Image (spheres, rainbow, N blue to C red):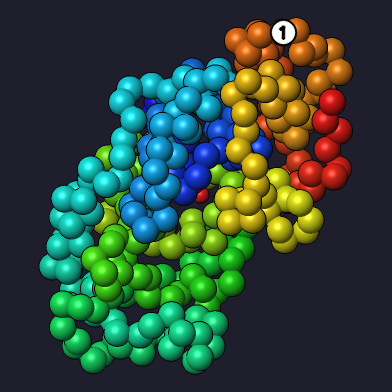
Amino acid sequence: MLPYVGRFAPSPSGPLHFGSLVCALVSFLHARQANGQWLLRIEDVDTTRVKADADQIILSQLISHGMHWDGDVIYQTNRQNEYQKTVDRLHKQQLIYACSCTRQAVKSKGKYYTGTCRDLHLPFKDNALRLINTSDDYGFHDLHLGDVFVEPLFCSEDLSIQRKDGLFAYNLAVVVDDIEQQVSHVVRGADLIDTTLQQQHIYRLLYEKPPRYFHLPVVCLESGKKLSKQNHAIAIENRRAVKNLIDAFAVIGLSNHSLSEKMTVEDLINWALKRWSPNLLAKRREILLLDINTV
Ligand code: GLU
């Protein structure tokens, strides 16, 4: 068996909110219970969405909530050469082509990209780059949710791997980083299920074995509306770390009635490490905040 290497990979588009705290917590508990490593990667590949200091705030939020990572924090902005090398390699394999379609142009033709530019041999300069997708996989086995299926048309889209402005795409960066960091388990929100198929496709083209995936339910305000930076979910406050953890425990299925706000963060984390199990977590893609019995 390979050693367990897990990771938490927040995008620094804002501080952690309650939903991302729950995600960090499950990924942390899952790794530590397996005596695994828990790495931290700041996913700042899309520099246009980065908020100043958000990375430092995230680091302090994790520490204040008792989640200490292993090794150095990796920043995607320091890994541009690695992404470029992978693009070059895929290009040599003749798997990449240039695409001039704007998002709007794609939308106007339907929901999914259908390979409009695949045979046009457009110049790479000033165009986005896409990866030819020959995969006919549209499902995978999730460690938590079991067999999961994704819209086949979405799974067979030629993936954008570099934007016209030169920024590397999230899917490419995540795969390159997870390979390099030898991540064995990806524990993340169920809102990323669809991207899993796309990422697995990149693994295949790079002749690498994908990690195991565990998707946890996303904390939502109402069905389909996840707590997110986009809908201005409030940042968790470090001075309320004990209360935040007790509330997060309720979300992940740990009964929190015996807990008191007089406990320390370390006590709470140790308590959870002894008791939590993935079986306690709802096997759903969403958990509504309203349904949670927080104290
Ligand atoms: N950076 C992504 C996010 O904050 C998570 C990516 C991942 O866990 O694979 O939503």
Residue 195 in view here: yes
Tell me residue 210's x, y (percent): 40, 48
Mark 1 Cβ inside 8 Å of ligand 1: no
Left or right: where does residue 221 sit relative to residue 154?
right
Q: Residue at x 62, y 33 (%)?
A: 236
On the image, which quarter does residue 157 sit in?
bottom left
Give me the residue at 19% from left, 87% from top: 122
- Looking at the image, the residue that sits furthest to the front is 52
Name which quarter of the figure residue 65 lies in: top right
* Residue located at (79% from left, 44% from top): 289
Residue at disc 1, secondary structure:
loop
Up/down of 33 relative to 81, above or below: above
Q: Would you place residue 220 above or below residue 132 in this image?
A: above
The residue wearing badge 1 is 263
Q: Position of residue 18 (x, y in %)?
A: 66, 38
Residue 43 horizontal/vertical position (percent): 39, 46
Image coords of residue 85 (percent x, y) = 15, 55
Q: Can residue 276 be seen from the camera position used here? A: no
In this rendering, the answer to whether 223 lies above or below 281 is: below
Q: Nearer the viewer, residue 293 or 186?
A: 293
Number of other residues with Cα within 10 Å of mark 1, as a class: few under 14, some 14 to 19, many 20 or more:
few
Location of the N terminus by quadrant is top left
279 vs 221, nearest the viewer: 221
The residue under label 1 is which amino acid type?
A: Met
State the quadrant of the C terminus.
top right
Looking at the rendered structure, the number of numbered marks drawn on it comes to: 1
